[in-house]
Image (cartoon, grey):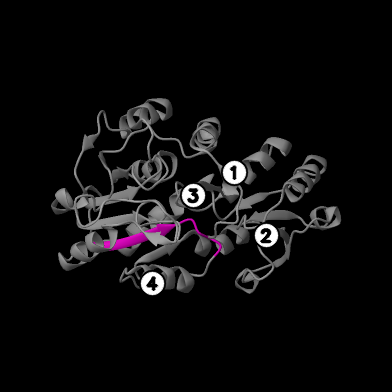
Amino acid sequence: MSINRPRLNFEQAIEAYLHYAPRLPQIARDAVPEKTEYVENLLSIADQFDLIVFDAFGVLNSGQTAIPGSVDTVRQLQGMGKNIAVVTNDASSSSEAILARHRKRGFDFSAENLISSQQFVAPMMNEHTDITHWGAMAPTDWPFHILPDTVTPLAEDRGLYDAVDGFLLIDSENWSDQQQSLLEQSLRDNPRPILVGNPDICAPMGAFLSVESGYFAHLAADACGVMPECVGKPYHHVFEEVLRRYPDVKRDRVLMVGDTVHTDVLGGLSVGIKTLLVHQGGFIDGQDIEDVFTRSGLRPHYCARAIGFGIGDSVNTEVA
């Protein structure tokens, strides 16, 4: 991810999540905790869990920089023998590139720790056996060779949109209003499948929220009436993969840590694991937290300012 994407403010982003909530995974009312316990930091409740699952943006890092206290907290959890997983909707980068960025920030993660929505894109495509040519929202240097079918990056040429049998929305880097308009026009004239590798509406990039592929997918769906098919949080693929990798850990000993109610918290609740929402340095930084819970109808089991607040420096959100 980079900082070149268009931007949303918080109210625009939360309104989009609320508006498109019917397209997200649906959970029973009793899956939502009755109240949220506010805690100082993650370490204060770590003894209750054997597996800690982290979202990255807004939890471990904001923009390109590690959130202060996060590196120390993860290091302490690893020293305690806790299992660590990192789940990301960043379908724009390879696992190796994502890990390299985390290591540069100071995190000691391996491929075993990382689960990316990118790994579920090809299996999602394979479910459409009648489609062999896709148009992609992705930079021309994206590694299309890892995908099973012919994939053409979408530019500002209407003919490209009309020539393909389905669409992959992977990476909104440099996606333009003109490209979005062409996508919507083509889908209105000929509705086709819309597959989404990053269902996020936005991502915290320090001082602003970047617009992500999920936002454009919903606009495209509005234009043609085709429900987007998504992989990544809050959808089941990444959470099922986490549980598959750690079969000996009981669900009541698993904690999902995130900064967004409609992705991290909803995803965790949907598979029956505990959830912790951090609110400084991420999506709801500076917002009325309980108001967000009331508006969304969702709430986590725990809430903290940041995973390492009170450990080392105070939290800041500046992008390096």
CB within 8 Å, label 2 to label 1 = no
| Disc number for residue 104 | 4
Mark 4 or mark 3: which is in front? 4
Return the disc, 3 or 2, that comes first in the chain's sequence: 2
How far apart marks 4 and 3 lie (CA) works out to 20 Å
Residue 234 in the magenta stretch? The answer is no
How far apart marks 1 and 4 lie (CA) works out to 29 Å
Q: Secondary structure at mark 3?
A: strand
Chain part drawn in magenta: 83-92
Q: Which residue is mark 2?
A: 129
Where's residue 202, x and y in %? Answer: 52, 46
Where's residue 201, x and y in %? Answer: 54, 44
Question: Mark 2: few, some, or many residues within 10 Å (few <14, many ≥20)?
Answer: few
Res 82 seen here: no
Where's residue 67, x and y in %? Answer: 33, 56
Q: Secondary structure at mark 1?
A: helix
> Looking at the image, which is closer to me, 34 or 108?
108
